[in-house]
Amino acid sequence: MTVVYGGSGRLCVWVLLLAPSALLLVGIIATEAAADGSGDAQDQDSGGLHVIAEDNSVNECYIYKTAIDSLMRAFAVLQEKQETTEEGEDGEDEEIPRHITRPADCYDIMLQDNTENGIYEIFPSSCRRRDWGIRVYCELYNNTGWTVVLRRQEQDDQTDFYRNWREYRDGFGEPNGEYWIGNEALHELSSSGSQQRLRIELEDWDGNKRWAEYKNFEVSEEDSQYQLHIGEYSGDAGDALRIHDGMRFTTYDMDNDSWGSNCAERWKGGFWYEACYRANPMGIYFKKTKSDKGITWRAWYSDSTVLKTVEFKIRPDTSTDGDAW
Ligand SMILES: [Ca+2]
């Protein structure tokens, strides 16, 4: 998602600057020549510059306007280049460092010298200049820069996770509480170029903690129903996500699972269900019990003991090994 300006950028700017001026000159000569030849032309071929107009004054206006528009665009390009790059006298290709652009994720937030965990605005869109910021929870301790994409936890009002396709696409909940970042943002974050690592942290109702990490985490675009891709596993929670690798997202109103009925409807969540799951982080929030409709990680508790806390978080894959927590 980095923006790269080619070394020929300065040449392009000068071409943009000079071309309209040349066009303007040719246009004026051409229209004046045409005016000398016939004063009442409605649609005249002006010496190679084909213009359609009522009279020559409109032609000139059109040409002037076009030239001015071109000049304004050229100046805008020049101004943008000066704002976003260093001098660049050497003509080499330049890549804008991540830390001086809008933050795409919490890793960028960390690179901008932020060290406090909390809520930040990020711009995961592939076009950083779009005003499409979203509020997320960032974990920045030890220069990690994790973007939290899912959280389940005990709170006064539990968030309802039995939601439709649109809600799972756009995200819901509050970043400082239970929330889902949204499949579209997850797609943007995980398809930005740098490989992403997914870290999952689990806690049961007795205070026991387990973790799992996956390399090469990626979520495809909506046309592919936000298909999940995960790589190598590490951790002590067990590889419950493995059977979900390659699955498309399913909600109660969008059945993409491999079961005859709808897994989301059956288990009251939304997930990359297969037929149906070994991990159910979007399940109903139950306290200290066993339930197939609850929040479970069956590679840890195969008897569907429900969990107290679940977090999914991602970051560019900069390390080789996961850490216990
Ligand atoms: Ca089905």
Image: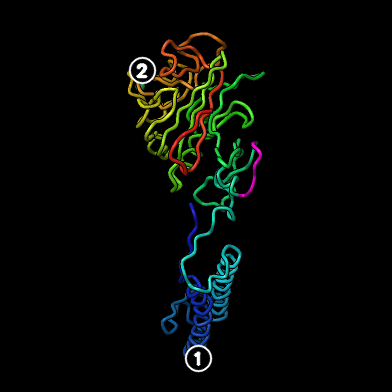
190 and 117: which one is in front? 117
174 and 34: which one is in front? 174
Residue drawn at x 52%, y 88% is 32
Residue 202 point in image, percent of width and height = 51, 23
Q: Quadrant of residue 151?
A: top right
Placement of 194 over or under 239, stated as above or below: below
* Residue sticking out furthest to the top: 289
Q: Quadrant of residue 298?
A: top left
- The crowding category of the residue bearing disc 1, from other C-alpha atoms within 10 Å (few below 14, some 14 to 19, many at least 20), is few
Q: Is residue 11 left or right of residue 240?
A: right
The amino acid beneath tag 2 is: Ser
Q: Is residue 190 left or right of residue 55?
A: left
Residue 72 point in image, percent of width and height = 59, 70
Q: Which residues are magenta?
A: 112-117
- State the mark number for residue 261: 2
- State the mark number for residue 49: none
Q: Which residue is mark 1?
A: 36
22 and 108: which one is in front? 108
Residue drawn at x 46%, y 24% is 270
Cβ(mark 2) to ligand 1 < 8 Å? yes
Q: Label 1, secondary structure: give it.
A: helix
Q: Is residue 46 left or right of residue 116?
A: left
Magenta includes 116? yes
Q: Spatial distance from mark 2 to mark 1, Cα to Cα?
A: 79 Å
For the stretch drawn in magenta, the main secondary structure is loop
The amino acid beneath tag 1 is: Asp
Q: Label 2, secondary structure: give it.
A: loop
